[in-house]
Image (cartoon, rainbow, N blue to C red):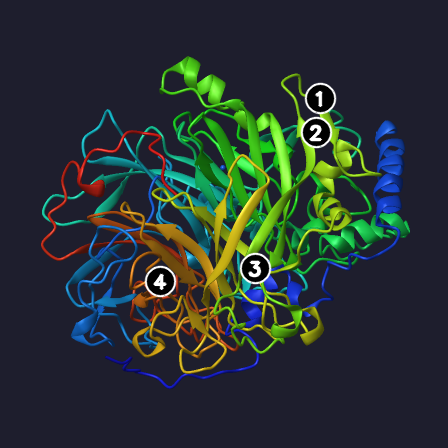
Amino acid sequence: MSVRRLLPIATPGISNRQHLTCLYKCGDQCAAPVPNASGNPYFGDVATEISRRGALKAAGVVALAVGATQVLPATVAAQGSLGAGALGSTGGGTLDTGFIPVAPNTADAVVVPAGYSSHVVIRWGDPVIPGAPAFDFENQTAAAQSLQYGYNCDLAVLYPMDDRDNRFLLIVNHEYTTEPTMFRGYDSAAPTREQVETAWAAHGMTVVELTSRAGDGGLDPVMGSYNRRITATTPFELRGPAVGPLTRTTADPTGTRVLGTLNNCAGGHTPWGTVLSGEENFNQYFGTTGSVTDPARVEALRRYGVSVRESGRKWERFDSRFDLAAEPNEVNRFGYIVEVDPWNPDSTPVKHSALGRFKHEGGTVHVTADGTVVIYSGDDERFDYLYKFVSSRKMVPGRDAAARAQNMRILDEGTLYVATFTGNSPESEIDGTGTLPSDGAFDGTGGWIPLMTVDSAGNAVSHVTGMTAEQVAVYTRMAGDAVGATKMDRPEDVEPSPTTGKVYMALTNNTARTVGQVDEANPRHNNKHGQVVEITDDHAGTTFGWNLLLVCGDPAAADTYFGGFDKSKVSPISCPDNVAFDPAGGLWVSTDGNALGFNDGLYSVATEGPNRGETKLFLTVPIGAETCGPLLFADRAIVNVQHPGEKDGASIENPASHWPDGGTSQPRPSTVVAWRDGFTGGTGSLSGGSLPMGSLGS
């Protein structure tokens, strides 16, 4: 049984992510110097000085659901690439994942195995709020976009509505906008106010009701009472130890009221029915044509990838809060975990600074037996860190008003930790080539170092010498530097298994790592393909064990590893990004920037038993797209297709993709639902039964 490849495996020196995507997704951060220059002898002095000067200036002035088996999005059915012997294998749970994998391809379609059907649920620009006009690519306005589905969709969470049969709430992040593919005639040197304000409205989040179609597994949007758009101008409450001199602005002398959320990437959902959304590459939205010369402030901005020059988007021309010279503290109000209550359209979303400020790829939940809530989050940057927050307040069972009120304060109290990783093998055996050490595994132990604790009265204590709790909350990266956290290869999505409690982290890649910088958790230099870490955590404690489940890339290459499984029987995988679980605890991994020359996709990965490490490509997304927000159920699956057609050299006049509408249409980021042929929808379609609002998933 061997992999049959539709395309040859290309191995360029970097990921397949296009420069256009890099520019608009993260401000081309990988082309800049690595922000983590820890070892800098004056970083503690920097934090102290920034706080002092900031105070002087101020004085003057958040899925249900995870994975499915045999249920993934499809627009085109494809023939498989593995022999029939793979049928009946499992992904670590009881559900059958015996689909015939798709072959690597470059099709302009969502491709899944034969035997599945799908359709697009909702596209960028589709109406969400009553009164929204139909989408008109040639005549976009900010007013219209604020009522329509936002742009690049990432996180997806789906809650069933207990009081309405066959109805669900879909909550989606809209990570970023790509103006050259949004607006005909866009001039990056001179954007118009309407274009900028339309982009503000296309960021943020969407809450939209869906109804289940009779006769198949489709889901259709509904103009429901819960529908909501959250944008870059929606009021938020900033809560926790960051509130103070470092977050006060001219418009908000309290430091607690922030307009908008930006670059919302992955996230999670809570057992009490809210959604957690991670603000990631917020650095790119700030710039100035003025002067920022304070060395301490420039260094703090640099540590977060913020450049002291005019931004690529030029937003500072249209709102002074994005001008680093005019409003020095506005940037400190982004980079948090956001919590949204989708059941109250009038509620004010919260930014939780007790969970730290960095480029949150997500925020996922594990609840211990005694009700302690643990939130895991990766900082998506080369050489940055893994974090967790452990609550001191216990979760209250139930969904009544009193329980929800109690639970929605859980993330205010607790301790923030950063991780260190230690390998089991001699350093001499980790040589940067990816060769397994003599014990046959990349594995070891780890520890959680406390950074700050917030008590029930809201009092915060720093555990980092030379930094106050406010500084730790605002300059969390620098706190991690101070305590010696382990530099990782772009920590992205981090998810605890709902069945085993093990935690899985996607490390996407890091081509900047040199031979002298490798360690057992990050064993390859010039790491263009990434790895997946399996962590056995003492969730509320301070120790863990770890191993590398996958060292990604071409299975034929010597430097790849698939949990010990026969590499001739796995699909090639590169640049893992999101991880998710199906109802039986099977692991699924999606990719972003596949450096093997074919489209990104979604894979099932066995984590337990004799097939541990078996990796099978379930779907691929269209040309230029990234696979986001996978939700996997027993009968349905949802996937977000982000930035289709984002290829260097493409233009509105000559699109690289016409997905999802075909013909000569422009590409539109969209949410897709898929189901196994023969499924007829109806009540109880999720995991074979009715799941209550707030059921814990990953």
Q: Earlier in the sequence, mark 4 or mark 3?
A: 3
- Crowd tier of the residue under label 1, counting other residues whose Cα lies within 10 Å: few below 14, some 14–19, many 20 or above: few
Is the residue 187 above or below the residue 5 in the image?
above
Q: Secondary structure at mark 3?
A: helix
Give the residue type that dot 1 points to: Asn
Q: Mark 3 sits on what residue? A: 25
- Residue type at the position of mark 4: Leu
Q: Which mark is residue 459?
A: 1
* Residue at numbered disc 4: 602
Q: Position of residue 662 (x, y in %)?
A: 29, 68
- Closer to the chain start, of discs 4 and 2, is 2
User: Are the residues at dot 2 and dot 3 in contact (C-beta closer than 8 Å)?
Assistant: no
Quadrant where the N terminus sits is: bottom left
Q: What residue is shown at x 45% (from left), y 82% (from top)?
A: 557
Q: CA distance from mark 4 to mark 3?
A: 20 Å
Callout 4 environment at 10 Å: few (<14), some (14 to 19), or many (20+)? many
Determine whether the residue tagged by mark 2 lies in a helix, strand or loop: loop
Q: Alpha-carbon distance for marks 1 and 3? A: 36 Å
Q: Amino acid at mark 2?
A: Pro
Say the numbered circle drawn on residue 241: 2
